[in-house]
Every structure is written in C-alpha cells, then in structure tokens.
C-alpha cells in the first residue's frame, strides 16, 4: 500500500490550499482515509477522515467548517480543501489509510478525541501512512 501526499506549500493567513493523497495497493472504495497533522513539539492529531464506502466525512473541532474532505474514486485520490487558514494550521500533513474490514468501532473516530477511548480508534491503529507534506501559514 502506498499513499502519496502533495499540495503543501507556504500560504498567507486567510488563504486556501488543497492537499491531495493518492492511494494505491488498497481497495479504494472499501477504506477509511484520514488526514493527520503534526506541528513541531506537538502530538500528531487527526483532522479529517472519510469512509470511502459511503463517503461519510468526519472533522475535528479545530477544522470543522474550514476544511472539506472529498474523494475522486477514478483517481483513487482524497482531497483536503482548507480555507481561512491561520498560523496554527501550520504542520506536516499526513494521510493515512486502513481497510474497513473487521472494525468494531469506526476508524474515522480517530478525529474525535473527545470521545472516550473505548469509543474511538487510536492513531496507532492506522496502518498505512504517506510521507507527509508541509503546510506553512504565515501571519
């Protein structure tokens, strides 16, 4: 399984950016694909996720209303459209994927840390990762 992110760059505060994640080696319409980010000195956090079987999107509270996740099944690509960016959004953004088979808890719960640990999937359960793409938002 291979995930390749692209689209990260330097952008001014208030601007927009679209990240792409192209997936190979995994059944694209039977997967959960998530975007995570990690800023220097901070833990990696899930920001958005999509169940490609039914295209259900999930967002963390920090990006809800500003980020939109979508898929292009023909290109096996997941997009993360980001708007109204602020310097706190600066981070390395990673996409990750898991097959939907065999989960008792929806894997996209990884982006909802307020859920009790027993009701969400941890980052450590996400098996396949891309190399990351840097997003820097200048003030």
Image: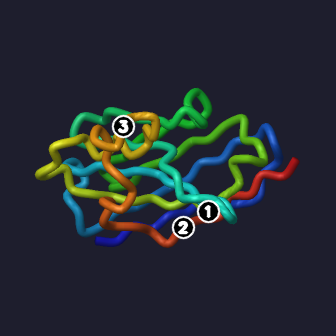
Instruction: Confirm whether residue 7 shows in the render.
Output: no
For mark 3, what is the residue? 116
Q: Is residue 17 above or below residue 21?
A: above
Q: Earlier in the sequence, mark 1 or mark 3?
A: 1
Look at 82% across and 47% down and name the residue there.
Answer: 12
Side (left or right) of 119 relative to 104: right
Residue 27 is labelled as none
Residue 132 is labelled as 2
Which residue extends farthest right?
139
Look at 71% across and 60% down and name the residue there.
Answer: 9
Residue 92: image location, x then y, percent: 61, 62
Q: Is residue 5 above or below residue 46?
A: below
Side (left or right) of 69 relative to 53: right
Mark 1–mark 2 CB contact (< 8 Å)? yes
Question: How far apart are the two marked residues, 1 and 3, measured between alpha carbons?
Answer: 26 Å
Q: Which of marks 1 and 2 is nearer the N terminus?
A: 1
Q: What element carries label 2?
A: loop
For mark 1, what is the residue? 92
Q: What element carries label 3?
A: loop
Side (left or right) of 26 relative to 95: left
Instruction: Confirm whether residue 103 shows in the render.
Output: yes
Look at 56% across and 53% down and name the residue there.
Answer: 19
Mark 1–mark 3 CB contact (< 8 Å)? no
Look at 48% across and 49% down and name the residue there.
Answer: 46
């Amino acid at each position: 399984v291979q995930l390749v992110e692209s689209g990260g760059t330097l952008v001014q505060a208030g601007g927009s950016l679209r990240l792409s994640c192209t997936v190979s080696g995994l059944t694209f319409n039977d997967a959960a694909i998530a975007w995570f980010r990690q800023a220097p000195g901070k833990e990696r956090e899930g920001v958005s996720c999509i169940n490609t079987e039914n295209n259900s999107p999930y967002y963390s509270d920090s990006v809800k209303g500003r980020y939109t996740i979508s898929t292009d099944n023909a290109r096996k690509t997941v997009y993360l459209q980001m708007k109204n960016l602020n310097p706190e959004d600066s981070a390395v953004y990673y996409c990750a994927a898991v097959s939907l088979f065999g989960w008792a808890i929806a894997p996209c719960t990884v982006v909802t840390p307020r859920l009790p640990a027993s009701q969400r999937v941890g980052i450590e359960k996400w098996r396949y990762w891309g190399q990351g793409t840097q997003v820097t938002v200048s003030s």
